[in-house]
């Protein structure tokens, strides 16, 4: 048996174990309440992300961890790999959900856990649904969740940061939560470039938080470009 097949079986077994852990989530929610259940979700998410990173053989070069605030915040990052989510979950150590395309919520096992993290499903083809997603996200931030957003709307090749979708920062400005720019470098090498999971050293930089509760109209107007420029700068 090759090492790659062994890793595939190992990860598949872990995902089945993750499904079983859902029974404990249900028990905690019923017997001990929402807080105990959500604490379990946070712990499970962190362990899953750590297992994913270790199984692939990723070495994380983390910078700017001190910039992550204790309060709920909105992480805005570039997007080059499906691994961006576990990388942020692992390195931020926050109670965090993501704005994710609705198809992600239908993925077996993983989709069920995504729903439990306070993540928000986004239907890009439905404007009314997109507005509801923003409002739901604001409510989740008020409940203590941080949220991660990839404003490019799609994955781009390494070193390329696409234009941010119009209105992609509305969640942060409406909730008045601080924005933390996240630059993720070389993640595409670990999967997207060759469509194979490969051991890689990935650099993650958390920029200084930007307050959104007292922005001038001019600052808010330029916010999307400001965040994008910080992300690009920290990738260099």
Image: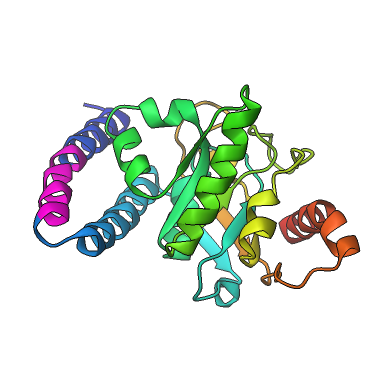
Q: How is the image coloured?
A: rainbow
Nearest to the observer: residue 212 or residue 66:
212
Tell me where residue 104 sits by quadrant. Answer: top left
**The magenta stretch spans residue 62:** no
What residue is at 59 percent from the left and 59 percent from the top?
74
Q: Is the magenta stretch mostly helix, strand or loop?
A: helix
**Furthest residue in direction top, as rendered:** 125
Query: Is residue 200 something that shows in the picture?
Result: no
**The magenta stretch spans residue 22:** yes
Against 107, residue 49 (above or below) is: below
Left or right of 169 in this view: 198: left
Against 95, residue 135 (above or below) is: above
Against 115, residue 39 (above or below) is: below
Quarter of the rendering occupied by the N terminus = top left
Highlighted magenta segment, given as a residue range: 18-30
Tell me where residue 178 sits by quadrant. Answer: bottom right
Query: Is residue 208 something that shows in the picture?
Result: yes
What residue is at 50 percent from the left and 60 percent from the top?
141
Quarter of the rendering occupied by the C terminus = bottom right
Q: Where is residue 52 in the image (x, y as percent from the top left)?
A: 35, 46
Q: Position of residue 61 (x, y in %)?
A: 54, 63
Left or right of 2 in this view: 208: right
Q: Position of residue 83 (x, y in %)?
A: 49, 42
* Count of labels in the image: 0
Tell me where residue 33 sits by quadrant. Answer: bottom left
């Amino acid at each position: 048996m090759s090492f790659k097949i062994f890793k595939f079986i190992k990860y598949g077994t872990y995902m089945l174990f993750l499904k079983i852990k859902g029974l404990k989530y249900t028990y905690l929610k019923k017997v001990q309440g929402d807080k105990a259940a959500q604490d379990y979700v946070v712990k499970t998410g962190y362990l899953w992300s750590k297992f994913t990173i270790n199984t692939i053989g990723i070495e994380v070069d983390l910078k700017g961890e001190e910039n992550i605030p204790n309060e709920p915040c909105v992480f805005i990052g570039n997007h080059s790999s499906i691994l961006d989510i576990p990388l942020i979950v692992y390195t931020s150590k926050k109670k965090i959900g993501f704005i994710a395309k609705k198809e992600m919520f239908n993925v077996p096992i993983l989709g069920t856990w995504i729903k439990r993290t306070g993540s928000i499903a986004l239907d890009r083809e439905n404007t009314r649904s997109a507005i509801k997603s923003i409002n739901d996200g604001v409510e989740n931030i008020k409940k203590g969740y941080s949220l991660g957003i990839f404003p490019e709307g799609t994955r781009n090749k390494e070193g390329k940061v696409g234009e941010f979708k119009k209105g992609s920062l509305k969640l942060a400005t409406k909730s008045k939560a601080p924005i933390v720019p996240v630059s993720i470098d070389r993640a595409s090498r670990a999967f997207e470039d060759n469509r194979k999971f490969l051991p890689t050293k990935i650099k993650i930089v958390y920029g200084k938080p930007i307050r959104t509760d007292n922005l001038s109209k001019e600052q808010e107007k330029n916010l999307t470009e400001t965040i994008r420029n910080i992300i690009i700068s920290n990738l260099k």
